[in-house]
Image (cartoon, rainbow, N blue to C red):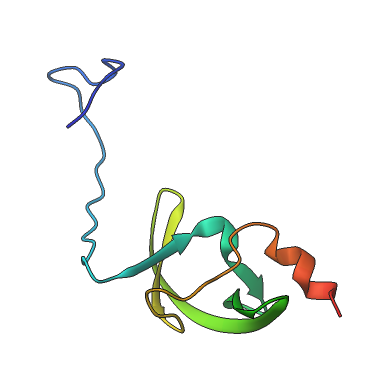
Amino acid sequence: CRNPDRLLKPGMYVNVNFTKKASDAVFIPAKSLLQYNDQSYVFLAIGKDKYLRRYVETGITDKDQVQILSGLQAGDNIISEGAFYLLNAK
């Protein structure tokens, strides 16, 4: 366990949550995930200046990453910053 700032000391009590990341799991930046009516979605880049709203099912959140259980595949190109600007784009 890395402890560069020496914040953890021997004998301290901590609360720990363990998560298991599968090596083939798809994780995306949390900031690329949008919400509408309790549904999560991302914008998928499908060509030059063409985007598709893709609904996804999410799993665990690990720091600033969200696991995608369904709706995306590894290698899909998603909009990771400013996706909310596409909501009103024509």
Quadrant where the image shows the N terminus: top left
Looking at the image, residue 77 sits to the left or right of residue 7; the answer is right
The residue at 85%/74% (across/down) is 88
Task: Name the residue located 57 percent from the left edge and 66 percent from the top edge.
Answer: 33
Residue 37, how many percent across, how many down? 67, 80
Residue at horizontal 19%, vertical 17%?
9
State the residue lying farthest toward the front.
Answer: 48
How many labels sit on residues?
0
Relative to residue 10, is residue 50 depicted above or below? below
Q: Quadrant of residue 27?
A: bottom left
29 over 70 or under it: above or below: above
* Residue 3 occupies quadrant: top left
User: From the image, which quarter does the C terminus lie in?
Assistant: bottom right
Residue shown at the point (50%, 80%) measured from the top left:
56
Residue 75 point in image, percent of width and height? 41, 74
Residue 45, percent from left and from top: 61, 76
Observer-nearest of 74 and 70: 74
Residue reaching furthest to the left: 10
Of residue 26 and residue 5, the one placed in the foreground of this image is 26
Q: Is residue 52 above or below residue 20?
A: below
Q: Nearer the viewer, residue 14 or 77?
A: 77
Would residue 76 be found to the left or right of residue 4 on screen? right
Using residue 29 as the reference point, say whether residue 21 is left or right of it: left
- The percent coordinates of residue 54 (x first, y second) are 58, 83
